[in-house]
Amino acid sequence: MQVKNICCIGAGYVGGPTCAVIAKMCPDITVTIVDVNQTRIDAWNSSQLPIYEPGLDDVVRACRGKNLFFSTDVDKAIDAAELIFVSVNTPTKKSGMGGGRAADLAYVLSATRRIAEVAKSSKIVVEKSTVPCRTAESMRAVLEANGTPDVRFDILSNPEFLAEGTAIQDLHCPDRVLIGAMQTPDGLAAQQALVNVYRQWVPEDRIITTNLWSSELSKLAANALLAQRISSINALSAICEATGADVDEVAHACGRDSRLGSKFLKASVGFGGSCFQKDILNLVYLAEQLHLPEVAAYWHQVIAMNEHQKKRFVRTILSSLFNTITNKKICVLGFAFKKDTGDTRESAAITIIRDLLVEQARVAIYDPQVRPEQIRMDLAEPGIVDDTLQQVTICDNAYAAAKDADAVLVVTEWDEFRELDYDRIYKNMNKPAFLFDGRLMLPADKLQTIGFNFMAIGKSHGTMAAEK
């Protein structure tokens, strides 16, 4: 089959950028991205895209209205397409069997049912969302139960391996493209059809073909292994603080080992984002269902260490500020889970700020990309009452957030935070002035010379020491 029309169901962080780049690199293919959220589609069709990603605006502007379209007419796009990406949200279940660990596949199965009901010709249906291993079996059951007898559906797994902040670069020059299929003649033919799409710009040696189940599990495994490295270096950061070792030096020494490499060995307040925690919890639930409790406990510890690191950071702030922050102003620089994105899902900032509010601090927040309404919505989750949110101020620059503050916390590693005038910030703070570097990005000696009580994760200077 030659693919001439692609439909992507889901206009979010994965579907939007992925299919925009496909449209750019494959001008002979018409790509339609659909979503039931009219507001989101309107934003994709405007000058203010619904997500921030460096380079995305240029890609969308180059293709929109030519071979790239955004629409709420889901049925029309399904009917016209030979290949359909299912790129909808798969959040962790909040309750019921597997609550807090298993992925909620309601949106995936709803999209699958819509495809089956609408399709009048054979379709290749591609899992783009991150899903549990063997989700394709559930999708096939839905397709067969709701489809027309003479319409054939072939299911592929094509997980995304994007890093927010570099997603467009990752899509243009991926480490690998993984495509899993049933090992049948029809399945292999469908797999080759998707290979032919990607090979228009991806070198063939970077396109990996596997069976369906290996592809589904590989995405969970990749994220679990990356998160494991972060939790490992964060665990070592506590030992560094207690012994006088420097976590950056330890990470550099270990990273020079060619068997380890240096990536994801940067200590911090903890990882966030939509994937790492969700995918590890999914893996934990899978191990539990397979009666592998030791495996489940092993991977769950990666999450436990991540939560411990955030709580440890807050305890350090409290002990440094004389064991009370009641009515003290704390400036938080950064709210996104990482730089170069407006995504706040599972951001370490949310946990840290909630804990500060419980201690009755006044919190001033600045992030260059996250909208104020998003910050308030994230902080208004269970455990934070409306009265408490009155202690939160959202500022439009770092200097306003830091004015009259007792402490400044760097929680997201935005490049602009390196270039701030810290002399100016210090002069406008209450004294003693504290600065806590949760991202290991600021020059300790310079800031201490200015007059800050400066503390950084994984460093033994100041009061950033292990808990007693």
Image (spheres, rainbow, N blue to C red):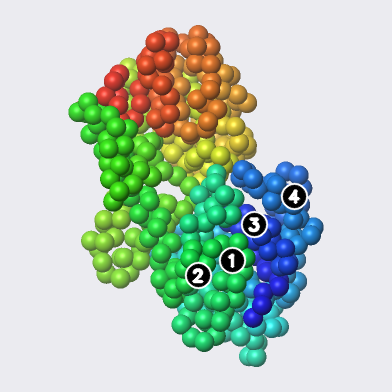
User: Which numbered tag is attached to residue 179?
Assistant: 2
Badge 1 element: helix
Residue type beneath disc 1: Tyr
User: Residue at the spot x=30%, y=48% of the render?
Assistant: 258
User: Residue at the spot x=68%, y=80% of the render?
Assistant: 119
Q: Earlier in the sequence, mark 1 or mark 4?
A: 4
Q: Quadrant of residue 101?
A: bottom left
Badge 2 element: strand
Q: Earlier in the sequence, mark 3 or mark 4?
A: 3
- Residue 466 percent across, percent down from the top left: 24, 29
User: Cβ–Cβ below 8 Å for labels 2 and 1?
Assistant: yes
Q: CA distance from mark 3 to mark 4?
A: 11 Å
Residue 283 in sight in this render: yes
Badge 3 element: helix
User: Residue at the spot x=43%, y=29% of the render?
Assistant: 441
User: Cβ–Cβ below 8 Å for labels 1 and 3?
Assistant: no
Q: Earlier in the sequence, mark 2 or mark 1?
A: 2
Give above or below for 17 relative to 128.
Answer: above
Residue type beneath disc 3: Val
User: Cβ–Cβ below 8 Å for labels 1 and 4?
Assistant: no
Residue type beneath disc 4: Arg
Q: Which residue is mark 1?
A: 198
- Residue 215 percent across, percent down from the top left: 44, 69
Give above or below for 311 relative to 38.
Answer: above
Decide which of 212, 333 is in the foreground and name it. Answer: 212
- Residue 349 percent across, percent down from the top left: 46, 36
Q: Nearer the viewer, mark 1 or mark 4?
A: 1
Q: Which residue is mark 3?
A: 21
